[in-house]
Amino acid sequence: VAARMLYSTCVIASLWVHKPIPLVVTSLLPLVLLPLLGVSPAKSVAATYMSDANVLFLGGFMVAAAVERCGLHKRLATSILLRTAGEPGRLLLGFMLATALLSAFMSNTATSAMQVPLAEGVIRRMRA
């Protein structure tokens, strides 16, 4: 069992470093390799992937991606810039208020993930 685990770890690490396939696919290989090689049952491997924390992060990133896809981050960024006049102190206050408002309706993880496209939108608007 130890040799098979070492083999699967080496294969996955090699794929991770050399990137012949996307990292997303590489990160899911233990779900297939460990049960296939008899190292661990599929149920225990899948339970590791679907822990409460992982699902929370996944949900947060999905919300952030949806906000970015529909362009809401650009609207929020423009609104923050218009209300703060681009001054650093007021801009920080605008981010803090936007984060507090979003955090009232969704998890802190999702709110934090949403701040990345929002900050990118503000930076792009300031450069334009």
Image (spheres, helix red, strand yellow):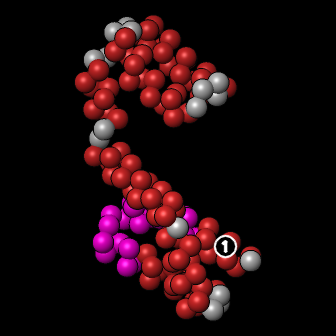
Residue at 45% x, 7% y is: 3
32 and 72: which is toward the camera: 72
- State the image coordinates of residue 75 (x, y, percent, origin top left): 53, 77
39 sits to left or right of 72: left
37 and 78: which is toward the camera: 78
57 sits to left or right of 96: left
Among the 4 quarters of the image, the one containing residue 5: top left
How many labels were placed on the picture?
A: 1
Question: If the image is split into quadrants, where does the N terminus sit?
Answer: top left
- State the image coordinates of residue 54 (x, y, percent, origin top left): 35, 45
21 sits to left or right of 6: right
Question: If the image is split into quadrants, where does the C terminus sit?
Answer: bottom right
Graded by Cα atoms within 10 Å as few (under 14), some (14 to 19) or many (20 or more), the crowding at tag 1 reads: few
18 and 77: which is toward the camera: 77
Magenta stretch encompasses residue 66: no
Residue at 51% x, 59% y is: 69
Residue 34 sits above or below residue 19 on the image: above
Secondary structure beneath disc 1? helix
Identify the residue position indicated by label 1 in the image.
123
Among the 4 quarters of the image, the one containing residue 86: bottom right
Magenta part, dominant SS: helix
Magenta stretch encompasses residue 104: yes
Residue at 62% x, 67% y is: 120
State which region is magenta: 100-119
- State the image coordinates of residue 22 (x, y, percent, origin top left): 58, 31
Q: What amino acid is at disc 1?
A: Ile
36 sits to left or right of 96: left
Residue at 39% x, 48% y is: 58
Residue 24 visible in the picture: yes
